[in-house]
Image (spheres, coloured by chain):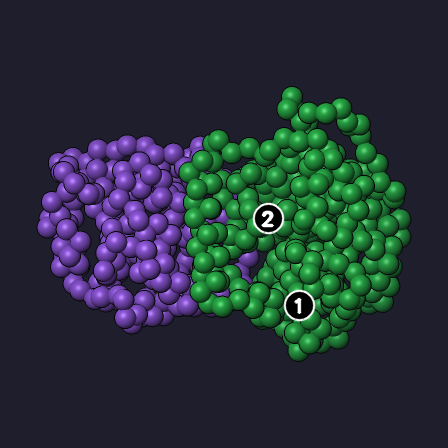
Amino acid sequence: MTRTTEIVFNGDLPLALHTLADGEGRPLLLLHGLGEQSPFRRPEWTRVWPGPVLALDFTGHGESGVPVSGGYMPESLMSDVDLVLAVHGPCTIVGRGLGAWVGLLIAGARPDLVRGVVLFDGGGLAGGGPQPPTPHVTVLPVGDGSTPDPAALAELSRDPRPPDYALDFVRFALEDSPLDHPIVVSSRIRPDWLAAVAADIGVVEMPLEQAIASFM
Amino acid sequence: MGETDETRTFPGARSPDRSWSADSSGLRVHVNEWGEPDAPIIGLVHGGFDFSLTFSVFAPMLADAGWRVVAWDARGHGDSERAHYYSWTADVRDHLAVITSISDEPIVLLGHSKGGGQLLDLLDGRPYLARAFVNLDGLPSQFSSPDVPDRERRRMRRADLTSGLDRRRRRNELSRRPDTIEGLAARRQPMNPRLPSAWLEFLVTLGARRDGEGWRWKIDPLLHLGGFGPWRPGWSMDHLASLEMPFLGVLSGVVDDPMGWNSRRRDIEPFLPPGGQLEFYDDIGHFLHIEQPRFIADLVLDFLGRLP
């Protein structure tokens, strides 16, 4: 099908939420990587999913709005996803790159609404590394509203992602999710945070399509 | 809403001599100034949930000693524009935008609390912005975090996350609760337990605006204490150790001040830049420049008087 788009608002800022496939039951929600946008058609690796397939353009990406003067944190993109959960109810999430990190955060913050998250490779997977990177402060140009927002690219490629911080979210998900294994790692690339997550006794590893199928 | 006197004064407080706006990548940042326009410049950066006019007693003391004192409101605070997003990084970038719009030459920078911590980040990356740096109880160390068990720490983080997400969901409905001047001052008192109610009531008339229902703080209701993500206090010491400009750090030793970092002299001393000066006062609270403005102003002026 040709994707259709609905608008969800984060404050006054519009977020583009695309439907890539119709269906009954719990949606599969795709989160893209840094600087990317939602796919225009359903990826082949989602064919196994019988329900609707949704894809969200994060703030500053794709067809979503661009805030004035940046200030991006993965935790604020988590609120983008939370607004989708508020509208559509429980979802299973597949996150690529930055979307994997945000997917882990929201799985921990809303364990009752995220019915499984699959962490996969993609742009912005490592962020700024486990420690703050070498300081680099610069005045960003005034944006023209186009995406990807340069402020998003600058700020979301430098945010620190300490492994112990990631493990807090693993614990939140494991403690309160109705699923036995709410987090599946399918990525081949493992920055420090993701290596720690994958090594956790409550987290399982599977190839992407098998991981998606495990949450049906 | 009861009858109330709608104006307040405070001994020594003075309105700014000038106000203007700086631009930070399209966001309007409100700037206040005291002192002669051609005097040497000292920039003041306030802490979390404060605003530039909290320097209304301290700044005139520096101005009267021959300085052009420039202070600005963080995004979403005071009279600066509210933003869609707030972050430590964005605040640091806003400071850079204001400082570079004030002067092409290095200036003296002073930061209180969170403002001091953010200047540590900024000056590690942009050391040539400052000819000297004064930090008032804005030196978080790895010992600043409360000593709580892991389970409790996770519970607190979880509660913070959930309330943050809930606020975002209700963003368009959020507003600051209206009250009388006395009521707003009383509600701020737990954050500032050592400051007199007369000061807090005066602060309301600067940091709140009145509408048909009463006074409301100007600060964006989306903002809350915390919300720094994985940021941890000990990272600031890396920045402190990297500095090279003349440095004065002032620590409050009052351990039960709720807004303080609780850093101790021995936590900070190993990371002082070469020649750095560190003062510690166990009888002055976190808001040193408000509790003891004359004493702290004299300390700062003495330090500035020794600059090359």
Q: Secondary structure at mark 1?
A: loop
Instruction: Report the side of B102 relative to B68 (left or right).
Output: left
- Residue A199 tag number: none
Circle 2 crowding by C-alpha within 10 Å: few under 14, some 14–19, many from 20: many
Q: Give the chain of mark 2.
A: B
Q: Three-letter amino acid code at disc 2?
A: Asp
Residue B175 seen anywhere in this rendered image of the structure:
yes
Q: Position of residue A32 (x, y in %)?
A: 29, 50
Q: Which residue carries the number 2 mark?
A: B94
Q: Amino acid at mark 1?
A: Ser
Residue A124, how many percent across, how many down? Answer: 35, 58
Lower sequence index among marks 2 and 1: 2
> Disc 2 vs disc 1: which is toward the camera?
1
Query: According to the colouring, which chain is green?
Result: B
Residue under the image location 80 percent in, 63 percent down: B283
Image colour assigned to chain A: purple
Identify the image quadrant of the N terminus of chain A. Answer: top left
Q: Residues within 10 Å of mark 1 (few under 14, many from 20)?
A: many
Residue B194 versus residue B308 in the image, above or below: above
Q: Are discs 2 and 1 located on one and the same chain?
A: yes
| Residue that mark 1 sits on | B263
Q: Nearer the viewer, residue B79 or B203?
A: B203
